[in-house]
Amino acid sequence: MKITYFGHSCFKVETQNLSVLFDPFADIGYDVKQTSADVVVCSHDHFDHNATHRIKANRIISDIVSEEIGGVKIETLLSYHDEVKGAKRGINRICKLTAEGKTIVHLGDLGDFDDNVSDFIAHADVLLIPVGGTYTIDANQAKDVIFITEPASVIPMHYKSADSKINISSLHTFTSLFDKISYLPSTVDVASLKDGINVMEIEK
């Protein structure tokens, strides 16, 4: 199984039998890569997470599901985009993929953390977590989520970069909270991820 980071909250996970793309974005500053996937999963209906029009896909998931496709179990959980049960920004769907002995969790634009979320994502092999604040949990909240749910490997997303037009906090705000960071290329084998915080380059 391998994973590729395209920037913002967009990742592609490829197993032997299936490819799944998370949260494709429109014009937010990053290069818009032409790609395809068997399945596209959108955490919520905002332009920086639901640009499915630019992806060639067999299936688009933008609701609550629990099913198996091509040997990959795909589960989504309703959560909230803000700390007031969606009153500001609406709902958010967390997605959990289970395949080839690994569990990958994409938190989308998580803005509120509760016991339901904790139970659903606990002990993931890979946790894709927003860290930029403003529209999601911030760096300190992300650290708390990591401490409580104990994932093996963590990949931060949804942070301010040199290319991003979104006004959120920088990656450094998050990484400064940890003693050891592993820096990786834009595409990696999931089995090669080290325990702890893994920062991936953005696919160019």
Image (cartoon, grey):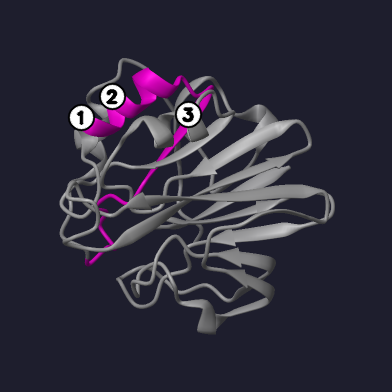
Residue drawn at 28 percent across, 49 percent down: 159
Helix or strand or loop: what does disc 2 sit on? Answer: helix
Assign a secondary structure to mark 3. Answer: helix
Extent of the magenta region: 141-165
- Within 10 Å of disc 1 (Cα), the crowding (few <14, some 14-19, many 20+) is some
Where residue 119 is drawn, which disc sits there?
3
Residue 35 at x, y = what percent?
62, 72
Q: Is 143 in the magenta?
A: yes
Q: Quadrant of residue 155?
A: top left
Q: Would you say residue 8 is visible in this rendering?
A: no
Q: Nearer the viewer, residue 62 or 38?
A: 62
Residue at horizontal 61 percent and vertical 72 percent from the top: 60
Binning the other alpha carbons within 10 Å of mark 3 as few (below 14), some (14 to 19) or many (20 upward) gives few
Residue corresponding to mark 2: 144
Residue at point 23% right, 32% down?
141
Residue toward you, 133 or 118? 118
| Mark nearer the viewer, 3 or 1 | 3
**Labels 2 and 3: the sequence-earlier one:** 3
Q: Quadrant of the N terminus?
A: top right
- Residue 190 % position (x, y): 65, 35
**Nearer the observer, 162 or 56:** 56
| Residue type at tag 1 | Asn
Q: Position of residue 48 (x, y in %)?
A: 35, 69
Q: Which residue is mark 1?
A: 140
- The answer to whether mark 1 and mark 2 are in CB contact below 8 A is yes
